[in-house]
Amino acid sequence: RKRTDMAGSIQVAGASLQPRQRNGIWKHAAIMCFAGACALIAVGAFQSFSSIEERPFISLLEKKAAATAAIKKAHVTSSASVKREEAEKAYKEHLVAKKQPAAAHKAAKPATLDEVKKTSAAATQMKKVDMVKMLHGAAHPAINHPAHTLKLAGNETGNSTAGNETAATAEEEEEDSVLTEEEEEEVKEGNYVKDAGGNGVWTADLFIFICGAIGLLFAAFLFWQVAAISLDTEGVEGKALTAEEKASDEELKTIYTTIQGGAQSFLWAEYQICFIFITVFGLLVFVLVSHTVEGGKAVWKWDVGGLTALSFVVGGLTSILSGFIGMMVAVYSNARTTVMAKGEGEKGWTNSFNTAFRAGGVMGYSLCALSLMILYLLCLAYRGIFTEAGKTDYTMLFECIAGYGLGGSAIAMFGRVGGGIFTKAADVGADLSGKVIGVGDGKKLDEDSPYNPACIADNVGDNVGDVAGMGSDLFGSFGEASCAAMLIGSASLSIQEAGWSALVFPLFISATGIVVCMLASFVATDLQPVRKEEDIEKALKIQLGLTSVLMTIALYPLCLWALPEKMMMNIDGAEADVSQMVCYFCIIAGLWGGCLIGFITEYFTSHSYTPVRDVARSTETGAATNIIYGLALGYQSAILPVVILSCIIFLALNTAGMYGVALSALGMLSTLATCLTIDVYGPISDNAGGIAEMVEMPSSVRDKTDALDAAGNTTAAIGKGFAIGSAALVSLALFGAFVTRVSNDQPGPSTLATDGVNLLSPVVFAFVVFGAMVPYWFSALTMRSVGEAANAMVREVARQWSEIPGLSQSAGLDFHQRQEWRQAGRELTKPDYQACISIATNASLREMIAPGLLVILTPILVGTFCGVQAVCGLLTGAIASSVQMAISMSNTGGAWDNAKKYTEKGELNGFFPYRDGSKLPDNWYQQAEREGGHGEDAVQQKVTLGSQDKTVKIKAWLADVEKTEPARYNKIMAGEEPIMTVDGRKVIYAGKKSQAHAAAVVGDTVGDPLKDTSGPALNIVMKLMAIISVVFADFFMSINSGNGIFNTGGLHA
């Protein structure tokens, strides 16, 4: 049995030793273990992780002989299966027999399971310690039993049975306490295990670098195709341009340059702050992470802190690079998409779609390839540092690598929050200024009107938030998921023994995804190109489905090749075998679960389906009912995605533990290149439409860009579903990595991994509630920031319309009137775009600091003052709350946005009856619902031209009424005068610039910060809090043994 004194020394067969000291990257660990402990360490290494079964009684000498033979065989054999199965079985039998009285052996009675449990309490405790230490980073089982925890003598104090044992038994015990030179060398190696590199390392190098190179070359090829498009539209259709068209081209170049300059100036201002943050917070990481725990005592390990800080810096700079590449590609391609949309017929549809899609691919493939190769290069560099004499400390290696995910996520926080505030301040300001406030006399402006001062800021914001911020966000997801999976995987001895390829298997998933997504992309651009409007959404959805199918096929042989046949994982506090197929199905569950979440999100946010149409129809009674319907839709839309996530989490945890959860997250992110391509495609198309509107191109061009943008909005909703689902799984995997690091430092057999976290513990429950509040606090800060910046924007627009001579008059003209002015040589006044860009930039940079600090400092302060159990409660509450809020916010905002688009398409015309006091027919709404009963065609107007009656489109008729009868036009827009439907019903006009449209715009402006600022940023809230906890876990454990300064944690010292 075992005896442990307060100093933590261990007694084995009369010899005393100190706990193993784990010094990280240098070979100092070797001199911290004493040779006198070799017997305990060698014997304890092979304790079984399965429960002790009843076996027929054999003599004590036979058991000890078998144990000694199996232990020696386990040390010299290279077979992991032989080492585990034989050595663990033999040691278990030896330990049980050793603890039983000699009289029981002489009686030759079989030992039952109950008897074994009663007479071998020390063996049971040793089993728990073994299980935890192997799971949480122990380098070799022969070292792990005594590490940080037990001191073992033959019996508990006061209960010695030595006098009852025979002399032969005593001699054998003394013999058994002596290790061979080979075993002593293994003890000296501490946390280091034999590096099974060789071909495995070369194979991993080739696989990852070849896939990464393919991704970079393909991104360069796509950029070359986009760059070949000239902004001079002469020759697009093979015809010479008129002077008017040439002037339009010059205006296009001017606007293109202005958008590009605004985007660059914002990025530079934001990244200056990010560079300062990386420097300051990097120093904080260096100092605090260096203060760690070893052998139950707080120590300073500057090498570990320095390497973690270096990983943080590399991750942060890579995140900045990702956002910069995306931004530059987007602003480079938007005008080229507009130019391609000028083409007529099928050619115009194909070329405009391919331009936007390929431009999105430049970011998608370059970001995935760069982030993959940079992370792998960092792993290779640290592998060299952590390898000594052919042995590698994989646990400490991947603990230091976790800083890479922290750097990416921290910069993503500023990119998402700052970019979100910028884009939504500009968007809301432009919407309210033009569509609600107007320029006087009831005249309203589109947000993309060139005479709306906020229009350029709005287009810049599309790139800042939806491209640069989103790129950094998804890079952070990739980095965190990969770091979490490798950190948890490195805690499994089976994966360590399988070699380098098994350890970096999470990177293989992402590498395979690059090649698969590249192959699938040719379907959209070459094999089945877009030829008409209906093809756009179908092509994008085929991309998502096809890449998922191909990944399902490709991942099967990858799992069989890279992973060992059996892996020992901690599942619900006990060790269990996990097979390659279990890992495969965890990945596939994440992959297809993400698809389901994405398409459910589309159902609730696309105006092709009933939920959004119901929201749009609610505008009949004003903005209030529109808000109510939208909120209800958002809450309802969270049900199925959360159920799916819950099922994935349960299955992954139940079959492969936290490693399975991390693999599920990587499964969702395995098609990241395609998701990024489609996500960037949307803002490019939106910008292209805005540019077409600002240079007043023909309606046929705007029709194409609007169709491209509408399809992008639909698929962007699917992408948001992927992002939210993967963020939830990544956060949970990081939570598991946090528990892993904490348990690895706990100086006792009872750890977080074996005992779990008691939800009813006062400190845990209190911080569950507190953690659930943090996302609301964060959302309040970000939404208020958008509101304040939008207010400033609206005031600036109103100032310009009132103070800049001629601007209000120029803005009040329609397209044809402006053409007449130009022909007459009259000059049109343009607004001061730069003033609005400056307002959005300054507001976003100022307002992003408080939310960012809230998320970054909360886990650090909680862990420092209240301990790791409080952090567990904090993360639990934050993750559960953030998932629900992110889904609800994103879908509510998306529904309001598409309800507005549904209204602007004129689809509500024919639905709203004009109430003049007469009773409506019982079948009135059934008539409106039927095909042809609503929409633009349902309200075509009959006019008399000479002696002929003619039917004209409602927009053309209204434009004529506005010129000839402005008072009547205003009444129609206000709903005070009816229009007639084709089937003879009196209805209220419900298209663009109507009262219903104004209500839809209110809903859209309320939803803008929900879907593009607070909602997406909540993904980063849960991930960033979790990765900070992982990186600072050792620092938390160094304060009162993990109980914090206030000593409230309740952990065993």
Image (cartoon, rainbow, N blue to C red):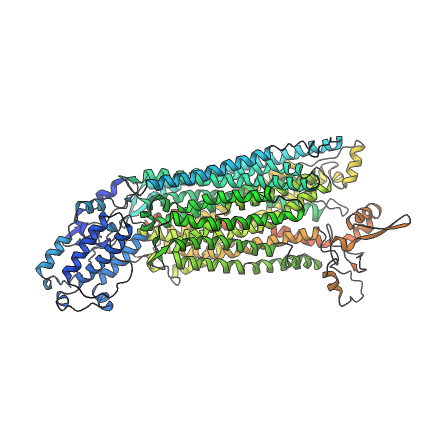
Q: How many marks overall?
A: 0
Residue 328 vertical placement versus 900 (above, below): above
Residue 709 location, quadrant: top right
In the image, farthest residue toward the right: 947
Task: Say which of 531 and 1010 sits in front.
Answer: 531
Give the quarter of the figure containing the N terminus: bottom left
Is 882 situated left or right of 685 in this image?
left
Q: In which quadrant is the C terminus drawn?
A: bottom left
Answer with left or right where residue 380 lies relative to residue 525.
left
Residue 485 on image: x %, y %: 40, 49
Nearest the eye: 944 or 163:
944
In the rendered view, does 456 fall on the left or right side of 127? Answer: right
The answer to whether residue 446 is left or right of residue 677 is right
Q: In the displayed structure, would residue 218 be above or below residue 52?
A: above
Residue 322 position within the rendered picture, expressed as x and y whole percent measured from the top left: 50, 39
Q: Position of residue 853 (x, y in %)?
A: 47, 46
Quadrant for residue 456, please give it: top right
**Front residue (pair 402, 62):** 62
Write down the quadrant of residue 351 in the picture: top right
Res 476 visible = yes
* Residue 412 seen anywhere in this rendered image of the structure: no
